[in-house]
Image: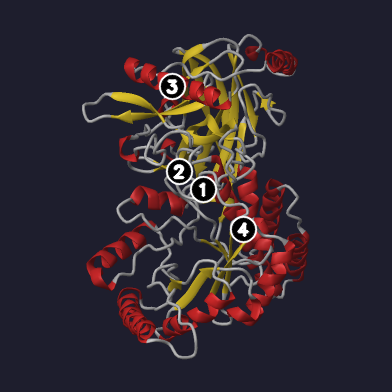
Amino acid sequence: MGIKFSLMLLFAALCGIQCVQAANVPPRQTYPLDPEAVESNAARVAQDLAGVDAEWKNAPVLYYTVEPMSDIKRLPDLYPEDGKLAAPLDIVAAKGEFEPASFVVYPKKNVDQFELEITELKNKEGDVIPVSQLDLKLVKIWYQCGSGWFGFMADPLGRTLTPELLLNDEKLILADPSTQDNYARYSNADGSTNYEWISADFMVTNYQFTNMVRIAMMHDADTLQPVVLNRDEFKQFMLTVHVPDDTRSGVYTGSITMKADGEKVGMIPVSVCVLPFTLPKPATNYDISKPFMIALYGTGDVQDHPNIIKNLVNHNATYLFGFPKLNPKDEEQFAKEVELAKELGVSLRPLFANGPGVHQTVYGKEPNAEALGKLNLLEEQLEATAALCEKYLGHTDFYCYGVDEGGYDTIKAERPAWRAAHAAGAKVMVSTRDHERMLYSLDFMIMPGMPSKERAEKNRKFHEAHPNGLVGWYANPHSGPENPDYFRRINGLMAYKADYDVNSNYAWYRNDWNDFAIAYESNYRGLIMVYAISDRVLDTLAWEGVREGLDDVRYATKLRQLAQEAEESGNVDALLIGRKALAYLAYWDSRENPDTFRMECANYIMQLEKELHKEQN
């Protein structure tokens, strides 16, 4: 019975492919709705309308402002408990910051062409934040493994609707509720398009090659395109505002016009309060002179993709694993990559996972000729790599990778290779358990497990044993969960408060568009924070959460810098404000609201700057 049912599902999915491809016209995107939820939602919306202006009473499309980084899994029939009907989109951001806001629309009728038109933002002096710095996206809901939103372990037999992708063109991906499958739109050389099934599971023969996305044939639009609205379905949108560095502080206002089938149906006021300061690069909690970094696995293969590098840098990810590539055999390419890195804002010291692999092992007291030969070759490679790094960057601060997750015997056997790296002026990094005294020659320990109080103590001891050493974290969770609040916390204040130096989770990107059949490590979901297409990557809710987490740390860093300045200023009032601020940072609990944390930091920052610079004012 189970096999017969599976074959029926497979046959239905294959029929779906044929129908979509033959018609070459995407079906209207719909989602399954719970009738009871629909009825309840309509009643609650009607109740909400009693408290807003009369112009909204008979509007065909309503909207609710909602928290952009919420842990709420916003589905089409889920009433926005945290939402405010017909409220303005209010954003607070420092100069230079990217900051999101979000809203969901609620249609009372079907709409074939729903459009959003945003204006530039102006202050009362006439200064402008241009439309080019305002990015509107649809939050696309599609089918993922049964652990979607919450976990990273595979559950291919369960399929669940999950909000994740930030798209300009909702028709790039279609989710079919009848079979719980996803389809990708491919653009062909002759200008035509077709949709293909991308939800094969392990029952499909040769699944690792079947129904995997052909990235080069996928193109998203450059700006938000019209979408369809279905009566009673909530639909989420995300607005990200980038405040240029030279923007004057103050309040900037504008609007988003909503149009349904060409007719204006409402307007969303937008307000951005630009704070009177810029944010520094993030520094560690235990030492503000040391950078707090994000350097993710899977960020190195970006040599010919400036759009992808810009995306990383704009998300505070300026340290890339393996880029620029230190290759003494291709000096010209390295020089080219260094120039591109400088142009786009990639950090060039240190360089992670950039040197020759130091995973050669030597067992026993009497190494054999083959092992010695490999070590000699490694020493030559390290010397050539160090010379190349010194020539173009003026330092040899690059890290070489050892044996991934090696045990005690492996670590001991690697030490000659690690010593060779140190002799060349390089450093050693590897993912490993906390093997304590065994790791005396390791410079960068990437320890599995999300930040916690227990691991904070391990970090403290590693720093005590390695005054210039780095500690990073990865895994549990790997990337995969779409929940932006979760990824904001673990990549931001949780890692910061646990005295980590680096977020090095696995992975930023692997070619795992199909969440139901992972060709590598099939016990996991697609370990992915972004999705590659032809000329860029598609952002996700989780990836936006990572940026917000790093920005939280930037606010904390700014506050610590000012508190230190106040301590040394001789100004008693500034000193006491600074100490009060540091007490707030010290006792902040990771279970608290990071938005509240952000605003408290901004408040203390402005108090300190006013007090420290009052004579200048």
Q: CA distance from mark 4 to mark 2?
A: 30 Å
In the shown orientation, is residue 386 left or right of residue 443? Answer: left
Which one is nearer the viewer's eye here, 42 or 430?
A: 430
Q: Is residue 427 above or below residue 348?
A: below
Mark earlier in primary sequence (4, 3): 3
Q: Amino acid at mark 2?
A: Asp
**Circle 2 Cα neighbour tier, 10 Å, few/some/many (<14 / 14–19 / ≥20):** many
Q: Which mark is drawn over residue 335?
A: none
Q: Nearer the viewer, mark 4 or mark 1?
A: 1
Q: Nearer the viewer, mark 3 or mark 1?
A: 1
Instruction: From the image, tell me which residue sits under label 3.
Output: 226
Q: Residue at 58% across / 26% down in the picture?
A: 2
**Circle 3 Cα neighbour tier, 10 Å, few/some/many (<14 / 14–19 / ≥20):** some
Q: CA distance from mark 2 to mark 1?
A: 7 Å
Q: Amino acid at mark 3?
A: Pro
Q: Amino acid at mark 1?
A: Leu
Mark earlier in primary sequence (4, 1): 1
Q: Residue at 52% across / 55% down in the picture?
A: 506
In the shown orientation, is residue 404 left or right of residue 221? Answer: right
